[in-house]
Amino acid sequence: MSLIFDTGSDLTWTQCQPCAGSCYSQQEPIFAPSASTTYKNISCTSTKCSGLTSATGNTPGCSSSTCVYGIQYGDKSFSVGFYATDKLTLTSNNVIDNFYFGCGQRNRGLFGRAAGLIGLGRDKVSLVSQAAKKYGKVFSYCFPSTASSTGYLTFGSSGAASGVKYTPLLTSQGDSFYGLDLNYIYVGGTKLPISPSVFSTSGMIIDSGTVITRLPPTAYSALSKEFRAHMTKYPLTKASSLLDTCYDFSNYTTIYIPKISMVWSGNTELDIAPQGILSAYSVSQVCLAFAANGDDSDIGIFGNVQQKTIKVVYDVDAGKVGFASGGCA
């Protein structure tokens, strides 16, 4: 079945029959627990049930002695259902017995037509933690440049190839998140005049489940100003939701955009791929794909658009996250 993977949350869940509440339309048939000989619901009195609180942010409920989970995401999407265990088959050679997951009976939100979500956070219920003996808390992925291209998600050190530049993984942002220390941003070779305290005050996490990178307003203002200075030959156009630096390219066949680089702790410099700099709604509305948070104290997020075509490696036990350009090749 097709699932969305999310490094910003922990619980893995899939829509389940009989969809006692409501299920959205998905690509494959909805999972039927009754057809599985290894499926088991978790008891309300189990420590596995009470341990859900840290992973979901909600106290689990109880229905006919079965543990009930509830989780809501930043965009108000949610899933509610039974906490259960079953055999998880990633590939024919990669099987995890007694995998704990959510059997969603009431699900709503922006999941496309995926059957559910894979939680890859740092909490003990995440797939990363449950499969630690098998894969050693190492995984990597690459988001493709377009929806028609191919990316991947790999578990184990085989995905951590040479050429990867690492930055320390910070755990100060909570039990689930992968924190990073952003030091500088360059636009077109110019280092932005942003005090390091701006980034250290807000902190930053890397999140595969967030689309657009969110920066402290002070940092975003400097980024937008410098980007606009490099783009004066192109006409500005109306903003689009969060994105306020937008251009009309309808009269141009070739577009030149400045390189954007982010420098992380350890002097790990990451050049954002061109596909990760602009977000196109139409040829007449193409926007800088970064946004400002509401306040400088709000946590920054390195989102998945800016991660396009980059190999991203998480080595949790070693306390580091790595990047390599051209990762989907």
Image (cartoon, helix red, strand yellow):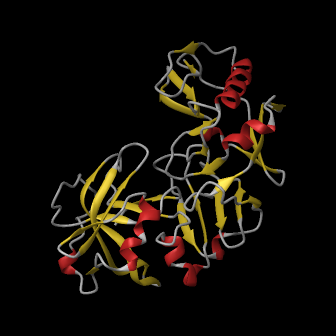
Q: Is residue 253 left or right of residue 70?
A: right
For residue 111, above or below residue 85: above
- 266 left or right, relative to 86: right
Quadrant that contains the C terminus: bottom right
In x, y percent, where is residue 305? 56, 43
Nearer to us in this view, 311 or 55: 55
Residue 300 appears anywhere in the view: yes
User: Is 212 positioned to the left or the right of 188 in the image?
Assistant: left
For residue 171, which quarter of the picture?
A: bottom right
Quarter containing the N terminus? bottom left
Q: Nearer the viewer, residue 270 or 81?
A: 81
In percent of the image, x 55 and y 47: which residue is there? Answer: 304
Q: Nearer the viewer, residue 163 or 299?
A: 299
Residue 119 in percent (x, y) is at 46, 63
Which residue is depicted at the point 52% across and 55% down?
8
Instruction: Identify the residue shown where x is 50% and y is 15%.
Output: 238
Coordinates of residue 287 in the picture (x, y in percent)? 56, 27
Question: Does residue 60 sit above or below 306 in this rendering?
Answer: below
Say which quarter of the image contains residue 18.
Answer: bottom left
Q: Where residue 291 sits: x, y (%)?
A: 58, 32
> Which of the 4 image quarters holds residue 38?
bottom left
- Is residue 195 shown above or below 23? above
Is residue 199 left or right of 9 when viewed as pictured?
right
Q: Is residue 256 visible?
A: no
User: What is the number of callouts on the image?
Assistant: 0
Residue at 51%, 72% (x, y): give it. 124
Above-or-below relation of 261 to 30: above
